[in-house]
Structure formats: C-alpha cells, structure tokens
Amino acid sequence: MNDPLAVIILAAGKGTRMKSDLHKVLHPIAGRPMLLHLIDSLDRAGATRRVVVVGASGEQVERAVAATGVEIAWQREQLGTAHAALQAKDALSGFEGIAIVCFGDTPLLATDTVARLAARLQAPDTPAVAVLGFRPADARAYGRVVADADGTIRKMVEYKDASADERAVDLCNSGVTAVRTRDLWRLLESVGNANAAGEYYLPDVVTLAIAEGGKAVCIETGEDEVAGINSRGELAAVEAGWQAARRAQAMADGATLIAPDTVWFAHDTRIGRDVMIAPNVVFGPGVSVADGATIHAFSHIEGASIGPQAEVGPYARLRPGAVLGTASKVGNFVEVKKATLGEGAKVNHLSYIGDAEVGAKANIGAGTITCNYDGFFKYKTSIGAGAFIGSNSALVAPVSVGDGAIVAAGSVLTKDVEAGALALVRPPQVAKSGWATQFRAVMRAKKDK
Ligand code: UD1
Ligand code: MG
C-alpha cells in the first residue's frame, strides 16, 4: 500500500435502540469503548489521519477519544451517512490519498481487512470505489450489493428502496467504503436524498462513480467482523464473539482453559504459556499473567500482575496494583489491592491485603487484615521477608513488621515490629480450674427448683 490512508468514522447517529445516556460507540466490548477498538485497528492499518464524525452527545465521544489524537468533525443534523462523511472534508483539507469510511458501531473491523480494501483500490484495474461486503446468515435490512461474480458492482441499494429481486441478493453492504479523496468529496457532494428514507446515502457514491464511467468493486469478509451494534442484544452478541476469539487465541498461545466459555478476558489481558485457568474466571482491564501461573475457579482479577508459577484462588479478588511475585500464593476469599507479594509469599485464606508490601516467603495467616484506611487517608503496611503473621491479626497502618518477625495470632498491631522479634498483642489467657463444671452445677440446680 503506497497511498497515505485516512479514515472517517461515522458516529453521529443517535443510537436510540440502545436506550442509553451513554453514547452508543462508547459502550464497552471487553472493557473498552467499542470506538477505541476500531481506532486501534485502523491505526494498525497505517491510517495517518483519523476523523470521527459526531452529532448527538458528541461531547462524550470527544472526551473519550481525546488521548488518541483523532480529529472531530460535527454533523449537527443527522441527514444520512453520505452527509455525515462529507462533514470530514474540512478536517481532511490538504490530505490526498485513500479515505476509508467506516461506522463507529461496527467495531471489530480487522486491520488486515482494512489493508485488503485499500490494496483493492490500488489494484491495476484502478477502481474508483471499493466496498466491503459480507453474506450474513440473516440479511435483514442491510443494504444490498448487486455485483458480478468477480466483485464488480452493478448497483448498491438500501433495503427500503430495494425490489423483491434485490432483497433476495445475499451480498450485503458492511458500510466500509474506500475512495480516493480526489473523488470522494465530489461524489459525496453529488449525492441526493430522493429515496425511501429521505436521507443522503453513502452507498450512492458507488452509483455515482459508475455513472461517471468509473469502476466499483466489492471484496468480502466474514459476518462476525462487520456485525453492527444497534441494541444491547447486539452488543452482547459482539462481546460473545470477541470473547470466543480471545479464548481461542489464549489456548493457541499455550494456556489451558478448562471451560473456555466461562472465562472472560479484557481487551488487554496478557496470558503466558502453560498458564492454567480454571472455570469461571473474570479478567478486568490491565492484567498480565506470567508463564506457568494457575488461576483457580471463581477468581476476579483486574489491574494485576501475576508472576511465574504463582497461584490465585479459588475465589480470589485481585484489584488494581496487585503484584504477585514468582510462585507466590493468594488463596480463597483473599482480596489484594495495591500490594506487592515477594517471591513465594503466601496469603492463603480470608484476608485483605491493601497498600502493602509483603517480603519473599512471608506467610500471612488466615483472616489477616491490613487496616489501611482511617476514613480520610490511606497508609502503608510493610511485612519483611520470611515474617509470619498469625491468624486473625489486624495490622493498623502505617506499620511495619521486620524480616523474620512473628506476630502472634489475634494481634492488633499498632507499632512497628523489629526483625526477628515476636509481637504479641492480646490479653493474657486466664484459666480457672473447675470453674465451668461448678458453674453448670449451680445453674442446673437453680433451673430445676
Ligand atoms: C448502513 C448502510 C447500509 C449497510 C449498514 C451496515 C447507508 C445509507 N446504509 O445502514 O447499506 O448495510 O449500514 O451496517 O449507509 N450516521 C451518522 N450520521 C447520519 C446517519 C448515520 O453519523 O446522519 C452513522 C451512525 O452513527 C452509524 C453509521 O453512520 O455509526 C451507520 O448508520 P445507521 O443508521 O446505523 O445505518 P444503517 O441503517 O445500519
Ligand atoms: Mg447500523
């Protein structure tokens, strides 16, 4: 591909069928707004200029894409897809090359497909327009592409305007359309709205290009890639498709998923080789799992880094900033937040470890809580290498326990503990011989009177 590539992403529609205050293109797939999936894919295809056309609730979109540096064009009135694409003209003034128009609600468009479409436009037969088509199992109300067997397009027709014969055509328009900018603006400006919807249709650029004596061609892709999202049901269906592909990828990369359909990945989950993931594990954003780690069932993990050979769960919750060292263990009903566990450290049962640093091989007993918050500020707990924290201890931060120290079970620690020391913070045990036996005898006698 030699010509520079620009993309125009249409996202000005109201998305009424979502019934949402959140703009349609910002609803997440795998924990990330669908529009950002699309922008990422287009960037990887080598797009040097990116324009998102926004209308209703456009400020939401503007905010969400601010970090990506895409340009924003406004379509104040939603008069149709051709009119929307034309709104990008000013933003792209001075740009000469290929423009690919695509839809913000069709987020899984693959990088390869974009490159294939751009390449088709530059093939020796020099078509004026290249359209991405697909053959869905149910063609519903998609626009139809009437084309020869070699992909030469004869006509594009919207479902509302199509004859019975045209509706019987199974080749559908995905909406993704490639045109050189030297043709695009002229064609878009010539599009009229004398049709069933009274809208300016983007597919009409094909008809106009053919009328000018140009050639229009269609290349095809799979249905999953270009399924549009117009409702919550379709959102869930696209999410399901994304998850299925990601699970297959994780397994292809050498992870074992015992029940793949029950594991949920985020857009950026990184999984190493020989990782074992048990059923019902959910990954939120920002997780990496190193080689040989095991995630047991029913664990919920986000913003965490899991080291090689580490073990997590069952029923563990790792929150942002959890960093688990090599061969460390976080067991059942343990929550870890913004805490580092050294190599071989263990927190096996019923604990909260937050804002903490735990040294190598330290052992945190069942029910240990780091009391990190006083209602106003957060404080840190540090636990040295090889330290042993007895069960049911409360470590009131800021506090530190030195290397190799032992904290007795049931302690409420408010002062630092030296390395190698024993800290025992609990009332001494009182034993009264025979007291219980006597007590029962007295009480029974009273009751029997
Ligand atoms: C469109 C295509 C249809 C194709 C289908 C694929 C047209 C006329 N029809 O139909 O051929 O089969 O997509 O999914 O292009 N938008 C704007 N401004 C507008 C209107 C729409 O920005 O004035 C945006 C929407 O936000 C959306 C995209 O364009 O992202 C497509 O609009 P939509 O109304 O969903 O078109 P469809 O009826 O699905
Ligand atoms: Mg649509």
Image (spheres, rainbow, N blue to C red):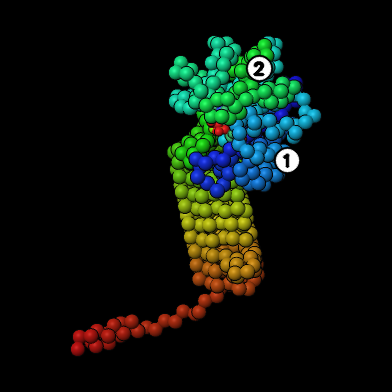
Extreme residue toward the front, this view: 194
For residue 223, say whether it is visible: no
Question: Does residue 364 appear in this view?
Answer: yes
Q: Is residue 282 toward the left or the right of residue 53 in the image?
A: left
In this figure, which residue is indicated by the disc labeled 2? 209
Tell me: 115 left or right of 334. Answer: right
The image position of residue 416, as x and y in percent, is 64, 71
Q: Nearer the viewer, residue 262 or 31?
A: 31
Q: Residue at x 69, y 13 (%)?
A: 126
Q: Amino acid at mark 2?
A: Ala
Image spot of residue 96 (x, y percent): 77, 25
Q: CA distance from mark 1 to mark 2?
A: 32 Å
Which numbered circle lies on residue 69? 1
Residue at point 58% right, 30% down? 199
Image quarter in which the N terminus is found: top right
Q: Position of residue 143 (x, y in %)?
A: 53, 24
- Name the mark on residue 215: none
In this rendering, the answer to whether 446 lies above or below 371 is below
Amino acid type of the residue that numbered disc 1 sits on in the rendered structure: Gly
- Tell me if label 1 and label 2 are in contact, CB under 8 Å: no
